[in-house]
Image (tube, grey):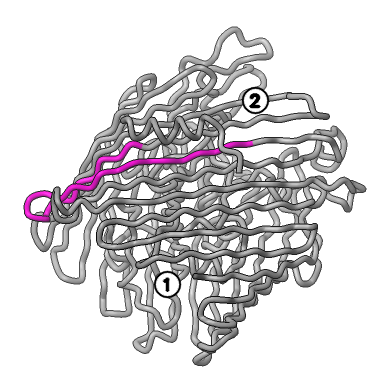
Amino acid sequence: MRISPKAVWAVTSLFVYSPAFAQTGAAGPGEVISEIVVEGTRLGQLSAETGTSVSIIDAEELQALGFNFAVDALAAAPGVTVTQNGPFGGLANVRIRGAASEQTLVLVDGVPVNDPSTPGGGYDFARMDTSVIERIEILKGPQSSLWGSDAIGGVVSIVTRESEPGAGGSVYADFGSFATSHGGASIGSAGAAGDFRLAASAMSSDGISRADDANGNTERDGYESRTLSAKGGLNLANLAKGARLQADFLATDADADFDSYRFGAQGNIADGDENSETEEIAANVSLSLPGFGGRLEQQFLAGHSTIDRQNFSGGAATFGAEGRRAIYRYQGTLSIDESNTLAFGAEREQTEAFDDEIAIDSLFAVHEFKPAANITLTGGLRSDRHERFGWELTARLGAAISLNPGLILRASWGDGFKAPTLFQSTFFCCGASEPNSGLKPESSSAFDAGLEWQAADGRILFGVTAFSQSTENMLNYAFAEGRYENIAIVDSKGAEIHGGVTLSPSLSLNAAYAFIDATDGAGNPLIQVPRHSGDLSLDFDGGGAFSGRLLLRHNGSEPSFGGGGVENWTRFDLTGRYRISGRVELFARLENLLDEHYQQILGYGVPGRSGSIGARMRF
């Protein structure tokens, strides 16, 4: 892997300074709901105690799904929809309940990684390799009271993998369609003194044409990437019981071909000699210190993320951008008594792009109150001071009631805000004489409520959540004005349903479905938001050598830019694993079994029937 001096600078500067899948923490059939911990609420609450709507995807579920990229796995969560302008490195957007992709805050080991050099400040999931991920939490609805600006629509929190107890490692490799190869290795050790894990992976593919080959586009667009992950910590027992110093580092270097703008072609896209090179880094160092006899948990964290993008056409550079984010955070979590827990803290975030910089200073507090053993009430408040747009105060309330060990009722309300990005604050053209100095932050308010029921024997699970969200002062580029304006309003409402049933000791059926009715202020449906989407999976695991999954994924029709839209589509995927021994296993994946032709974005193609086969060895 090519590690640039920027990567070295990022690390040194820091030191100078469940079940497998769950909706609101829900377990799959046969697993216990209350044992799942939700870290993204800042309180480390058990699932049965949080009123926030959360979906969790862990390493075991990522392995069962078999996807190489996190964007494909995220679509398994109800209410989460994804679009990508072609596979293998194409721009990948994630929407939560219809909110724009740039309204989703993405965290990697607690560090914000949204790209400040893009117009909307969103995160591109195209290059996130699932092999480095231990757990993904998706918090739905406004989370600004917890995580500040950019969390207006929700949060995707990614935790990278850490070492297992003892010493060991693994190697894996797989090969498949389109001359695709993917492999990696890891090594780690964990003991009383501390732990570390070092992992590297690489992928290469000839790819397919980004512009749909059904429109006569035959040129393949290749993709290469290299990922390096490092995580380690020292347990400072001599300082205090429970004290720990930890560092996390994740770097990705990717090279992707893409096609050209061609007016008049479907989606205005056709074969072309375009290429992008991207370097991404996310790193942090943290110190955990206990206090008050263990009743107070404290964490001091300094984090840094960068992204450097360069585009080329015919080998000549056409565009470049670099964005940086730095976060400095203190959080204390105090166990006041058996009924009250308080998390509080302060943050300073610095964002830099286009030779410009903005800072936000924040104070936050989250209080958990348990008036009874089966009732948990949560309230959060946050004050953010943006150096250009002033003060913003956001709040969130949640309630969870366990009527019995298998039935949980939940409800939450929250509001959020998103400050204009550096680009939106400074860009103007086409007749405008200056940027819009009167821009206001976007704001949102949302409510959701639902229930979760699990049979006493654990064989049946059912959950449903209804939600309603309104966003005002959304920023759009006004062509007539030549600059950005607060001109958009979006209303989104709908329902998410998930469930599962154990059919036999070796066979289970799981389903997830979402209905999203998202419209703008004029009542027009939002682009790239399907009203209906969902997954249905049949899992086999006899406890022996073989396990597998048949996955059906459906995405409803959705409108596109410039009118028209893409049709609904349904795809079948099949994954399987064969354990030769406790250390060696074979795995395979067949994608789009019925060779369905469809588009996620108008004019862009997707792979037809394809597959891969590989092996993994642990030592």
Residue 549 in sight: no
Closer to the camera, 332 or 613? Answer: 613
- Say which residue appears at 66% left-offset and 58% top-offset: 182
Q: Does residue 295 show up magenta in the picture? A: yes
Which amino acid lies under the numbered mark 1 shown in the image of this protein? Pro
Q: Is residue 311 left or right of residue 377?
A: right
In primary-sequence order, the first of circles 2 and 1 is: 1
Residue 348 in sight: yes
Residue 89: % across, % down:
68, 46
Total tally of numbered discs in the picture? 2
On residue 19, the disc is 1
Which amino acid lies under the numbered mark 2 shown in the image of this protein? Gly
Q: Quadrant of the N terminus?
A: top right
- Say which residue appears at 56% left-offset and 33% top-offset: 4
Residue 8: % across, % down:
47, 33
Closer to the camera, 280 or 435? Answer: 280
Please identify the quarter of the rendering in which residue 530 is found.
Answer: bottom right
- Helix, strand or loop at disc 1? loop
Closer to the camera, 133 or 553? Answer: 133
Q: Is residue 277 above or below residue 571?
A: above
Farthest residue to the top: give it.
Answer: 433
Q: Is residue 315 left or right of residue 22?
A: right
- Say which residue appears at 49% left-offset and 41% top-offset: 103
Magenta residues span 278-302
Q: Is residue 157 left or right of residue 355?
A: left
- Helix, strand or loop at disc 2? strand
Please identify the quarter of the rendering in which residue 17 is found.
Answer: top left
The 10 Å Cα crowd at callout 1, few under 14, some 14 to 19, many 20 or more, is: many
Residue 523: % across, % down:
59, 44
Q: Is residue 288 above or below residue 384?
A: below
Q: Is residue 221 above or below residue 443?
A: below
On residue 320, the disc is 2
